[in-house]
Amino acid sequence: MDEHDWLAERFEEHRAHLRAVAYRMLGSLSEADDAVQEAWLRLSRSDTSGVENLGGWLTTVVARVCLNMLRSRNSRREEPLGAHVPDPVASRADGVDPEHEALLADSVGLALLVVLETLAPAERVAFVLHDMFAVPFDEIAAIVGRSPTAARQLASRARHRVQGATVPDADLSRQRAVVDAFLAASRGGDFAALLALLDPDVVLRADLGAVPAGASRVVRGARAVAEGALTFSGRARFARPALVNGAAGIVVAPRGRLVVVLGFTVMRGKIVEIDVVADSARLRQLDLAVLDD
């Protein structure tokens, strides 16, 4: 085995971990893959003979790439903060696919990713590295260009925001019962049943593919969301249960063609958040094994 092949083999040992780091930082599967690929390119061009901890070295590279991507994204962002729907990770309803386990460790639900979207780039990087992957603050400081004390403060501010986020019900069977009832009410056009399932302050976020041109991407309040769910009744007959970021969700796939993924956040038996992804380009990134019978 030559040096390039040996290095490639070592890199593959860390790929799943690196993709998990990048996904938490970026909330985008395609951008996470881009960041991991950039890490490989940098590794293949570098002299790593003096690197004792290759995993740590690669994590640092991915974090720096992600930080630059976040800063670039923020500079060109036109959509209202909080409107963006992170890329979902969809799996069969009977269990998370093994290849998704690293991505979804530590309960990385859509509700958490939405909160992470509101953080400043350096805050997000510091929080993800320290609180999710136990990277020391002195190493984080070098990545974000701050002192260790400042890096600690960045993570602390992020943690405060995250702790105020919605905490979904942990019981998957209870989640599923609520989501199944939502689907049944949508199919049956039962407005009263939909209202009973939705929290009064429920928030629905939809990507550009899921709403008419010029329409709002964020819908708030039980009545408005229930009215929208009634318009979903035609597609609801093609819906099937799925796990979306480890929580109860729905995929819609008429004739096996994936057109919508809905992620639900259920708290105290009520739906408090719904995230809808219907953009065809983003849906093509999903593992279509979720559609297998």
Image (cartoon, grey):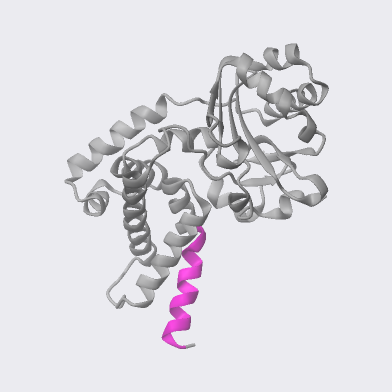
- Residue 10 counted in the magenta span: yes
Residue at x-position 71% and y-position 27%: 179
Residue at 63%, 50% (x, y): give it: 280
Which span of residues is magenta-colored? 2-17
Q: Is residue 198 magenta?
A: no
Relative horizontal placement of residue 169, taking residue 81 as reference (left or right): right
Residue 81 sits above or below residue 65 on the image: above
Q: Residue at x 63, y 52 (%)?
A: 286
Magenta: main secondary structure equals helix
Q: Is residue 18 above or below residue 225?
A: below
The image position of residue 72, as x and y in percent, is 33, 51
Q: Is residue 206 visible?
A: yes
Q: Position of residue 243 (x, y in %)?
A: 67, 40
Residue 48: % across, % down: 31, 75
Quadrant of the rendered image containing residue 66: bottom left
Residue 216 in the figure: left or right of residue 81: right
Q: Is residue 17 visible?
A: no
Left or right of 271? Residue 142 is: left
